[in-house]
Image (spheres, rainbow, N blue to C red):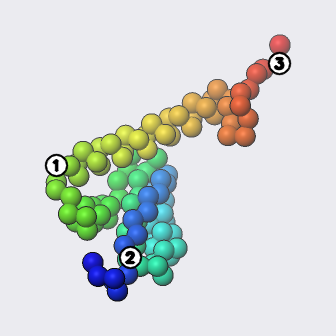
Amino acid sequence: MSSTDPPTIIDLTITFDAPESLDAGHARKIEKYSCLGLTMPFVIGALGSWLPSNNAVAVALNIPPAPWRRLRRKCRLMAIQGSVSIIHRHIRGHGDDQEAYIPAP
């Protein structure tokens, strides 16, 4: 990469798992960052869905297939774990703006 090449931006977003949400997340990242350089959105669904265009990141970074598969599994697992954590906090009554919900006696 020479000093005159535009930067490559790889930005992660976690969306709902519906195909239209994954596509919308991808489009939002392109719209937001394309003016700054080559934009490669990395989109994962909250329940582990994988947008096939994510694989372009592996090609751009020259990541071999085996390490890419491991990264893919880890990313999907982290998205699922994060979603489960949010659901767990919500059910337990722990919101983002409060430390703990203590029910009245």
Q: Is residue 48 left or right of residue 1?
A: right
| Residue located at (43% from left, 44% from top) | 79
Which of 27/98 is in front?
Answer: 98
> Which mark is on residue 87?
none
Please tell me whether mark 1 or mark 3 is closer to you in this view. Answer: 1
Distance from the alpha carbon under mark 1 to that under mark 3 = 53 Å
Q: In which quarter of the image is the C terminus?
A: top right
Image quarter of residue 6: bottom left
Q: Which residue position holds label 2?
A: 7
Q: Which of marks 1 and 3 is nearer the N terminus?
A: 1
- On residue 66, which mark appears? 1
Q: What element carries label 1?
A: helix
Q: How crowded is mark 1: few (under 14 residues within 10 Å), some or many (20 or more)?
A: few
Picture coordinates of residue 76 (x, y %)? 36, 45
When the figure is inspected, residue 71 is found, relative to residue 13, above or below; the finding is above
Image-quadrant location for residue 60: bottom left
Q: Answer whether labels 1 and 3 touch (C-beta < 8 Å).
A: no
CB under 8 Å between callouts 1 and 2?
no
Seen at 63% across and 34% down, the residue is: 90
The residue at the far bottom in this view is 4
Q: What element carries label 3?
A: loop
User: On the image, numbered disc 3 is attached to which residue?
Assistant: 104
Instruction: Decide if residue 69 is on the left or right side of residue 14.
Output: left
Quarter placement of the N terminus? bottom left
